Image (cartoon, helix red, strand yellow):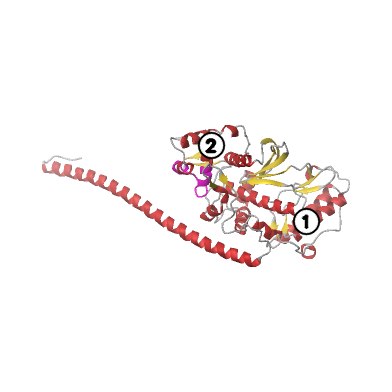
Amino acid sequence: MVKLDVAMLKYLTTEDFRVLTAIEMGMKNHDLVPTTLINSLSNLKFGGTHKAIANLHKYKLIYHERKHYDGYRLTYSGYDYLCLKTMTKRGSIFGVGRQIGVGKESDIYVVVNEDDEEMAFKFHRLGRTSFRSIKINRDYHQHRKNASWLYLSRLAALKEYSYMTALYKAGFPVPRPVDHNRHGICMQLVKAYPMVNVQVISNPGLIYKQLMDLIVKLAQYGVIHGDFNEFNIMINDDEEVTVIDFPQMVSIDHENAKMYFDRDVTCIVVLFARKYDYQSDYVPDFDVDITRTHNMDKEIEASGFSKQLAKKFDRMVDVGALRDGEEGEGGNESEEEAKEDDALHADSSGNVKVDAPVEGQDEGDGHDDDEGADTSESDDGDAQEEYDEEMKRRKQVQRRVQAKIAYQNRRKRGVKNTYKNREKRAFREEAKDQGRGFW
């Protein structure tokens, strides 16, 4: 359970945040970030790095481990502080209030801006025990590499923010997105209640039809919610419906799109039959009632959540390519993940730039231009090949340097041992010539 305590946020210095950012950058390709690398990335002098590390470790914003080698990694609390610091500097939030929601994948808090407007702030926290146990029971870790829970949480937040923005612009009943950074999303605070807590509604037939029409309309726009149930549907006093929680949304071109669509429909049918004693003949069918009218799934790819990130996120979540580590610990990420992690680049002041576009991806809309999409994919492939060749060359140079250092160390030990053995042989030969015994 990660508890958000922002009391220390105002006491942390610029040096502390530079060290946090340095550890975040180092975790792109390190499980544990060594102190030498932290010092190099933070560029602090006169022992400032060690002082900041001691302060951050005191308040459990970083985790220290020396089991295999000595190093540090970010905890969820440290990642929260980086996210809140960036949001504060942007002016998106001004204060943090009480916690209003908690789940196996996220925590939700009330925040305010400078105008005292209340908003909702959602932290994605993938990696909790209830979420990891699913992967354990289904043997997800077989033949899979490790990945960081922090990195996966950032991808989930980026995906949800992209879908929420597109749906809000299209006029769907979703919260208004305000800002996004790392694993946090700031959005409108909906004055409504989760449908799971609503026992009586005055017109269940009307609400039922609205929800079914919403499922069909989403599919016509090219997306499927994937988790359309009473926990992700909000209803206010006027019985107006609002839909939340979008990290699991998929395109209607997904290989399991029909299964996800039928599952959403079944959840609503069962809910109204069991809880509100209402049944209807209106049950949408994916093959009959769905005709694509928009390409929102392609627009999402152009808005920041690229196809490569989508494939990586689905692979990590659905297949569970994560290790069973301590909650809040990081993990190894591939070089491709480090390249695509545009949220982990720091400027000279130690702040993190999060608005840079994904490499190989245009900043324009690019909604329906198939030719442009093909060109972009070919450019991505060429850029990826060049990047792989460069990283391969760097690895070879690094291996040669390490081999040279290891060889020199062996030579030093060999010379030292040879000298000792030569001295022992000389002592034995002298004892033998003098006729003395030797034990």
- Image quarter of the N terminus: top right
Q: Residue 340 at what x, y percent from top left?
A: 56, 54
Please say if 305 is above or below 57: below
Q: Is residue 430 left or right of residue 308?
A: left
Between 181 and 355, the one lying in front of the other is 355
Query: Disc 2 versus disc 1: distance between alpha carbons?
Result: 47 Å
The type of residue carrying mark 2 is: Thr
Indicate which disc residue 215 carries. 1
Q: Residue 288 at what x, y percent from top left?
A: 79, 65
Q: Which residue is mark 2?
A: 14
Q: How many numbered circles does the render carry?
A: 2
Q: Residues within 10 Å of mark 1 (few under 14, many from 20)?
A: many
Q: Residue 234 at what x, y percent from top left?
A: 78, 46
Please say if 59 is above or below 233: above
Task: From the image, state whether disc 2 or disc 1 is nearer to you.
Answer: 2
Q: Secondary structure at mark 1?
A: helix
The type of residue carrying mark 1 is: Ile
N-terminal label among 2 and 1 = 2
Q: Residue at x 44, y 37 (%)?
A: 45
Residue, far left: 434
Q: Does 423 lie within the magenta span?
A: no
- Image quarter of the C terminus: top left
Q: Residue at x 50, y 50 (%)?
A: 29
Q: Residues within 10 Å of mark 2 (few under 14, many from 20)?
A: few
* Stretch of the chain drawn in magenta: 21-38
Q: Is residue 70 visible?
A: no
Q: Is residue 37 visible?
A: yes
Between 316 and 156, the one lying in front of the other is 156
